Image (cartoon, rainbow, N blue to C red):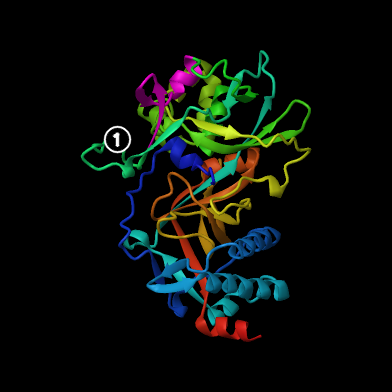
């Protein structure tokens, strides 16, 4: 599944959202007179790629899946054909007259979870950090493959009187290990990285040069490692230790190390560069830990096909794939987003365009989307600065008339 963790929300932790009321209307039909401009300042080639991947996915799923928008139920064929109609227009005339075309052939549904049109928009990326397949004096912080002794306890399978609900039972799964005949929580970050709980088991996949790089790799769930010879390996999410996540950005703010108005991923990295003795102390506040898998391939370059897989099982596309709460939105829908991306100077850079709902994430709940920014240093910086609590999201589905015309061709 996708390991897209929310880089700024989860690291910084300065914005919180309540879990959604799933009974509340999650979308609202927008009257024609209230439609936004539907401008697009993104790469149209990437949009076509994201649509093609989505269409391939629709060919593989069961036909009984249902998408609900303001009480209207759409099947997989409706969603697929809506994409085909949209794609045919772009193939014919590109982005010309797109609003006029969409107002004729599509319904527009605004995401209104929690009775408001405001949506929190954050960004995520695939990290690219320098590393080595063998340790040395510089590359000495390992990323591990999934240990074979991680046990999962499905708490929902037990009667309530057997397991009392507590902090570690909320999600329905407990990650654990056996010690003799006792079931204990799996090793924490401190157990693994300070006390060496996994040493000597041949679980090391690669070694990074800074502990904060390994920590941020865990936050994203996976990404790329640049080897000394200039080639790359890709590590995918394999599992986790099950400990709760705690924001280190919030810790730095609470301790007065970084002002809240300045907190960001770049600011956190700068703080650790200036105070290397603080790196592990602060990171160990978060006991959550991620494990990886590697297919053994070494790549000359990072191509779009190498990007992380989203929850739908295919690679996400830069600035064209979003993650949503899959309790509310099943995935696969065409959408249009509008928001503000912060710059390093604190200014607002407008961002708008068509996207596909192709992912999810552990911190994505309710009126919150996560936009995939790409791989490497610039996408990392952009993702770290992306946090707009007043963005807008609209889903697009073809009208019954447009679907009928398309199917009669």
| Quarter of the image that includes the C terminus | bottom right
Image quadrant in which you'd find residue 28: bottom left
Q: Is residue 348 visible?
A: no
- Depth check, front residue: 197 or 194: 197
Labels in figure, total? 1
Q: Position of residue 88 (x, y in %)?
A: 67, 74
Give the residue at x 58% y 52%: 313
- Residue at image location 57% in from the left, 15% down from the top: 200
Left or right: residue 55 versus residue 360 is right
- In this view, the residue in front, 75 or 219, is 75
Task: Tell me the SS state at disc 1.
Answer: loop
Quick check: is 96 in the magenta stretch? no
Q: Quadrant of residue 156?
A: top left
Residue 88 visible in image: yes
Q: What residue do we see at 54% from left, 44% from top? A: 124
Front in this rendered view, residue 182 or 134: 182
Residue 175 counted in the magenta span: yes
What residue sits right under mark 1 in the picture?
167
Image-based side of 251 in relation to 279, left or right: left
Q: Which percent across, then down, holds residue 9?
A: 44, 41
Residue 252 is left or right of residue 276, and the answer is left
Magenta highlight range: 174-195
């Amino acid at each position: 599944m996708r390991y897209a963790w929310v880089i700024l929300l989860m690291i910084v932790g300065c914005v919180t959202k309540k879990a959604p009321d799933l009974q509340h209307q999650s979308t609202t039909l927008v009257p024609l007179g209230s439609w936004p401009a539907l401008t697009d300042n993104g790469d149209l080639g990437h949009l076509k790629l994201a649509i093609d991947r989505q269409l391939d996915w629709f060919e593989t799923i069961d036909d009984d899946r249902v998408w609900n928008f303001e009480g209207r139920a759409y099947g997989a064929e409706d969603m697929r054909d809506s994409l085909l109609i949209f794609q045919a227009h772009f193939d014919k005339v590109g982005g010309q007259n797109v609003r006029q075309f969409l107002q004729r052939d599509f319904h527009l549904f605004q995401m209104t979870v929690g009775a408001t049109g405001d949506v929190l928009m954050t960004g995520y990326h695939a990290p690219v950090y320098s590393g080595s397949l063998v340790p040395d004096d510089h590359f000495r912080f390992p990323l591990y493959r999934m240990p074979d002794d991680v046990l999962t306890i499905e708490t929902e399978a037990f009667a309530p009187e057997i397991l009392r609900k507590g902090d570690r039972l909320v999600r329905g799964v407990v990650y654990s290990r056996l010690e003799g005949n006792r079931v204990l929580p799996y090793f924490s970050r401190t157990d693994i990285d300070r006390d060496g709980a996994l040493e000597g088991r041949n679980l090391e996949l690669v070694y990074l040069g800074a502990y904060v790089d390994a920590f941020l790799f865990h936050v994203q769930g996976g990404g790329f490692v640049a080897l000394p010879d200039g080639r790359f390996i890709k590590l995918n999410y394999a599992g986790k230790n099950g400990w709760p996540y705690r924001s280190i950005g919030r810790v730095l703010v609470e301790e007065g190390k970084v002002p809240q108005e300045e907190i960001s991923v770049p600011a956190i990295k700068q703080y650790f560069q200036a105070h290397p003795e603080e790196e592990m102390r602060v990171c160990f506040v978060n006991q959550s830990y991620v494990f990886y898998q590697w297919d053994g391939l070494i790549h000359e370059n990072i191509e779009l096909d190498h990007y992380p897989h989203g929850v739908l099982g295919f690679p996400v596309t830069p600035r064209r794939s979003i993650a949503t709460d899959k309790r509310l939105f099943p995935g696969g829908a065409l959408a249009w987003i509008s928001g503000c991306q912060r710059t390093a100077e604190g200014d607002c850079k407008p961002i708008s365009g068509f996207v596909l709902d192709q992912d999810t994430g552990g911190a994505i709940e309710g009126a919150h989307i996560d936009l995939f920014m790409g791989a490497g240093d610039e996408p990392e910086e952009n993702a770290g600065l992306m946090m707009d609590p007043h963005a807008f999201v609209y889903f697009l589905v073809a009208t019954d008339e447009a679907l009928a015309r398309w199917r009669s061709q």
